[in-house]
Image (spheres, helix red, strand yellow):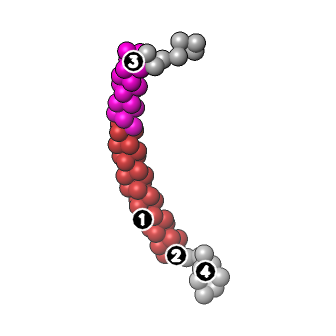
Amino acid sequence: MASGSNGDVTNALIFETLKAMQGTLARHTEDLREIKSRLGILEAQYASLSTRVDRLDERLARVEKRLGLVDTAI
């Protein structure tokens, strides 16, 4: 942190530093909100895909069973 001409930190310098920190914190807060929003969207998409894959797996198992392709020794 810079100091005044006599080596002391001035109130104005502290105020400016705190304002800069507050601005940085506000930007980080907004970034975090956006990240959380995107993560929520990704979680919903993953859940949807997972459900679809599970259904496909069940359908494939039924087809394999009908065609006699299932190994009964498992």
Circles 2, 1 touching at the beta carbon (< 8 Å): no
Of badges 1 and 3, nearer the viewer stands: 3
Residue 23 image label: 1
Type of secondary structure dominating the magenta stretch: helix
| Image quadrant in which you'd find residue 40 | top left
Picture residue at 47% right of the left edge, 73% below the top: 16
Which residue is labeled 3 in the image? 67
In the rendered image, residue 55, in percent from the top left (x then y), is placed at 35, 25
Which label's residue is closer to the chain start, 3 or 2?
Answer: 2
Figure quadrant of the N terminus:
bottom right
Labels 2 and 4 touching (C-beta < 8 A): yes
State left or right for residue 23 relative to residue 7: left
Q: Amino acid at mark 4?
A: Ser
Find the distance from the CA under tag 2 to the CA under tag 1: 15 Å
Tell whether position 15 is magenta: no
Asked whether the residues under the numbered discs 3 and 2 touch, taking CB atoms below 8 Å apart as contact, a structural biologist would say no
Please report the residue visible at 59 percent of the width from the left and 83 percent of the height from the top: 4
Q: Dot 4 corresponds to which residue?
A: 3
- Check disc 2 and report the residue beneath it: 13
Q: Residue furthest front?
A: 68
